[in-house]
Amino acid sequence: MESDLLRFWGLDLVADLGTPRLTWRRLGVLIERMPEESALMRSLVGTEAAQWTPERHLLAGVIDSLGVVAYLLGGNLVALGGAKTNPVPEPKPIERPGVEVAKPTGERGLMSLARKMGQSPVRLT
């Protein structure tokens, strides 16, 4: 924590603590708002989890979504007779620390989505 205070706020814990520059109250506030990349956060949540900022989680979500879109477009190619099998491999979500990936239920497609939403599936011909 001493190195984090010096690195992020230019405060010397030994020299400044108890002075108007670094009161005990201010020390508590700074500790509560320690950046994700700090040594304190790495020691609390682990090095890998500390590296996963909110921006990284969002970016991983975008990449996962693009994989699903590509897979669905490949499925459309099959449905339209342009290919026998989907040329795009089934997407696998990017692993994130502390986030469990949902297990597939076996049911897929729009029909399963309609059932999950409580609608009766309608077949289009």
Image: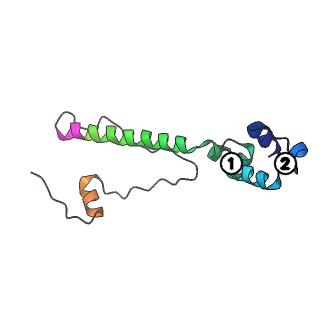
Left or right: residue 36 versus residue 73 is right
Query: Total of numbered circles in the picture?
Result: 2
What residue sits right under mark 2 in the picture?
A: 20
Left or right: residue 7 versus residue 19 is left
Left or right: residue 81 versus residue 1 is left
For mark 2, does the 10 Å Cα neighbourhood hold few (<14), some (14 to 19), or many (20 or more) residues? few
Question: Does the magenta-highlighted stretch encompass residue 81?
Answer: yes
Question: Does the magenta-highlighted stretch encompass residue 113?
Answer: no
- Residue 57, percent across and down? 52, 44
User: 106 or 37: nearer the eye?
Assistant: 37
- Residue 66, percent across and down? 38, 38
**Could you tell me the amino acid type at mark 1?**
Gly
Residue drawn 68% across and 48% down? Answer: 46
Q: Secondary structure at mark 2?
A: loop
Q: How is the image coloured?
A: rainbow
Q: CA distance from mark 2 to mark 1?
A: 33 Å
User: 5 or 71: nearer the eye?
Assistant: 5
Q: Nearer the viewer, mark 2 or mark 1?
A: 2
Q: Earlier in the sequence, mark 2 or mark 1?
A: 2
- Residue 68, percent across and down? 35, 43
Q: Secondary structure at mark 1?
A: loop
Query: Is 78 drawn above or below residue 32 in the view shown?
Result: above
Residue drawn 26% across and 63% down? Answer: 115
Residue drawn 31% across and 57% down? Answer: 107
Q: Residue furthest right?
A: 15
Q: Quadrant of residue 64?
A: top left
What residue sits right under mark 1 in the picture?
A: 46
Q: Quadrant of residue 112?
A: bottom left
Q: Which residues are magenta?
A: 76-96
**Could you tell me the amino acid type at mark 2?**
Pro
